[in-house]
Image: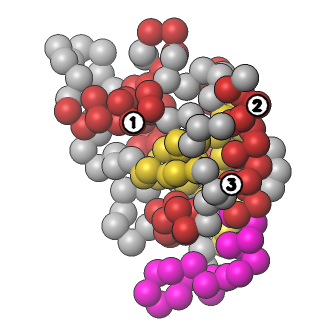
């Protein structure tokens, strides 16, 4: 089988984001035959159908989504829901003809935040994914309490159990992408 190309999209724009750390950790833990490119949302403006042309940052994001066989969403939780940057990226993609950038593709969700580790936002993202026809990995789920000492002073993920869960999720995503591509 050909290489599986994943696109990581982080809903946090903060440079020292723990959610971005999860994506970078995922890049280190990929199964053989899988690559993970991380998209930048820092220059992507809010979706506006009145814009005469798509801004360059949007074109770059949509091109990366076109090339991706599946997605890894790093989903922070803002006010019990999805971060605006992540939702906005999905809104831009969903406006493409026949939702072809998202429909039928596999995705995994991970997130780091307070208390329940972004579980509410992840469940909202799954609801949005139903409309977008995304197919999510159900297990394992990656919910990281960012304030429990699992990130080192340098911002890296220090917890081997969480690293193992991320690795298991990526293996499950690889299998789901393979099934979705048939």
Residue at 70% across, 46% down: 173
* Residue 59 shown left or right of residue 113 in the figure: left
- Residue marked by disc 1: 64
What whole-number distance in Å separates the C-alpha atoms at marks 2 and 3? 14 Å
Residue at 29% across, 50% down: 42
The percent coordinates of residue 132 (x first, y second) are: 60, 23
* Residue 34 shown left or right of residue 12 in the figure: right
Image marks 3 and 1: residues in contact by CB distance under 8 Å: no
* Residue 4 shown left or right of residue 92 in the figure: right
Q: Is residue 155 magenta?
A: yes
Range shown magenta: 148-166
The percent coordinates of residue 134 (x first, y second) are: 65, 28
Whether residue 32 appears in this view of the structure is yes
Residue sticking out furthest to the front:
1
Quarter of the rendering containing residue 88: top left
Quadrant for the N terminus in the image:
top right
Quarter of the rendering containing residue 143: bottom right
- Residue marked by disc 2: 179
Dot 2 alpha-carbon crowd within 10 angstroms: few under 14, some 14 to 19, many 20 or more: few
Residue sticking out furthest to the right:
139
SS for callout 1: helix
Residue sticking out furthest to the top:
98
Up the image or down, 134 lies above or below 9; here it is above
Residue sticking out furthest to the bottom:
153
SS for callout 3: helix
**Label total for image:** 3
Residue at 34% across, 46% down: 41
- Residue marked by disc 3: 170
Residue at 50% across, 52% down: 36
Q: Nearer the viewer, residue 131 or 171?
A: 171
């Amino acid at each position: 089988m050909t290489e599986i190309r994943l696109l990581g999209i982080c809903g946090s724009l903060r440079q020292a984001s723990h959610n971005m750390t999860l994506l970078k950790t995922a890049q280190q833990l990929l199964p053989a035959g899988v690559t993970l490119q991380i998209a930048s949302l820092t220059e992507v403006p809010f979706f506006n159908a009145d814009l005469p042309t798509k801004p360059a940052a949007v074109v770059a994001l949509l091109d990366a989504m076109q090339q991706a066989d599946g997605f890894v969403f790093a989903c922070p939780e803002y006010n019990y829901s999805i971060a605006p940057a992540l939702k906005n990226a999905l809104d831009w993609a969903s406006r493409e003809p026949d939702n072809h950038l998202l429909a039928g593709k596999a995705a995994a969700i991970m997130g780091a935040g307070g208390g329940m580790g972004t579980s509410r936002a992840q469940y909202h993202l799954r609801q949005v994914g139903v409309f977008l026809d995304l197919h999510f990995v159900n297990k394992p789920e990656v919910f990281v309490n960012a304030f429990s000492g699992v990130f080192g002073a340098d911002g890296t993920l220090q917890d081997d159990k969480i690293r193992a869960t991320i690795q298991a999720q990526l293996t499950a995503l690889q299998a789901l992408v393979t099934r979705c591509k048939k």
